Amino acid sequence: MARTFQVGDTFTHVRQCDRLRPVYYAGASGDYNPIHLDPEVGRLAGFNGVILQGLCTLGWAVEAVAVFVGDPGLVRRVKVRFSRPVLPEDTVTFQGRVTAVADGRMSTEVTATNQRGEPVLRGAVVETSLG
Amino acid sequence: MALDPKFVGRAYGPFTYEIGREKLREFSLLLGGSVPSAGTFGEPPAHVSPLLYSREAAQAGPYGDIIAFPSFAVVFAIRPFSAAIADPELGVDRVRLVHGEQELEFLGVMRPGDVLTTTGHITELYRKAGMDFLVVTTETRNASGEPVVRGVWTAVIRSA
């Protein structure tokens, strides 16, 4: 039985960036930029150590919506601006809100904030098919 | 120094990538939060869809086989963007580069064995608020020539 979605529906997805997550994501994705692996390079870039790959944060925003709709194969589009890096040991809370449902397609706005309340993504939009 | 707008239109690729089953599992599980140990990708976290790693579950599902997590597309579709950033004639200062924006459009699901070819080109080069913006647009097609993924990749190069 197909689940129905309505404008205004909301959902939350919480993800931890454990200390080695940038290393794991590097291996899985092939993004071995040293800013994600070498704390000294991270410090030279103005951070306190390594930072998580922005595309991992994008992946989590997509995941938040995929879990909400129940099928990752239904995701059709994602668009984000990276406003602040995620750091090891950060907790990121993704909050989604359905903004449009029409013609078998759904649009969702997603905010992502760290445990200090700072946004790590801006203007994130994820669109899905509804099967 | 501003990037020269004469490079708008410069093309990179084609780059070809064949999707492997274990790579899809690895990406989905590690993005999803699993903790790998020697020789394994780790236990699947509860929220990760079995359609992404279990052949049995996938065969009973809508796609008949495991599928790629959508953002797995970055693994291969990033190539023209990376090539532009590394292009010595363009002269991007990588120390000051950050990934500013990302857009991905998925026109179909990606499965093990798919052979995908990505091309891309620089669509915009502009300066705003003392920073250089480099925009690369990519298109990935399957072996039949059908588009599977489109991407718009924006790098921001901060001033010295």
Image: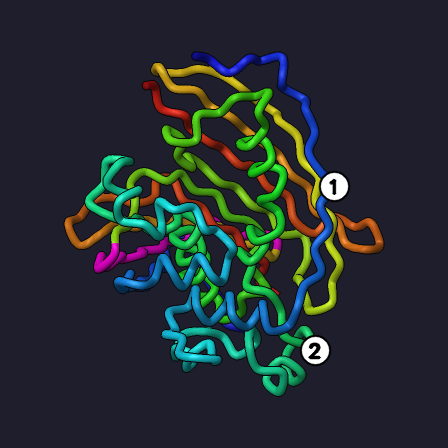
Q: Residues within 10 Å of mark 2 (few under 14, many from 20)?
A: some
Asked whether the viewer can see residue A99, the reply is no
- Residue B96: quadrant of the picture: top left
Asked if residue B142 is among those painted magenta in the image, a careful observer would answer no
Asked if residue A98 is among those painted magenta in the image, a careful observer would answer yes
- Three-letter amino acid code at the position of disc 2: Gly
Disc 1 is placed on an element classified as strand
Answer yes or no: are tags 2 and 1 on the same subunit: yes
Please give left or right for residue B4 compared with residue A115 in the image: right
Q: Position of residue A101 (x, y in %)?
A: 51, 53
- Residue B113: quadrant of the picture: bottom right
Q: Which residue is mark 1?
A: B14
Asked whether the viewer can see residue A90, the reply is yes
Please give left or right for residue B18 compared with residue B3 in the image: right
Range shown magenta: A88-103
- In contact (CB < 8 Å): disc 2 and disc 1: no
Q: Which residue is mark 2?
A: B64
User: Compared with residue A43, is residue A93 higher up or lower down, i.e. above or below?
Assistant: below
The number of callouts visible is 2
User: Compared with residue A55, is residue A43 higher up or lower down, i.e. above or below?
Assistant: above
Q: Position of residue B93 (x, y in %)?
A: 44, 25
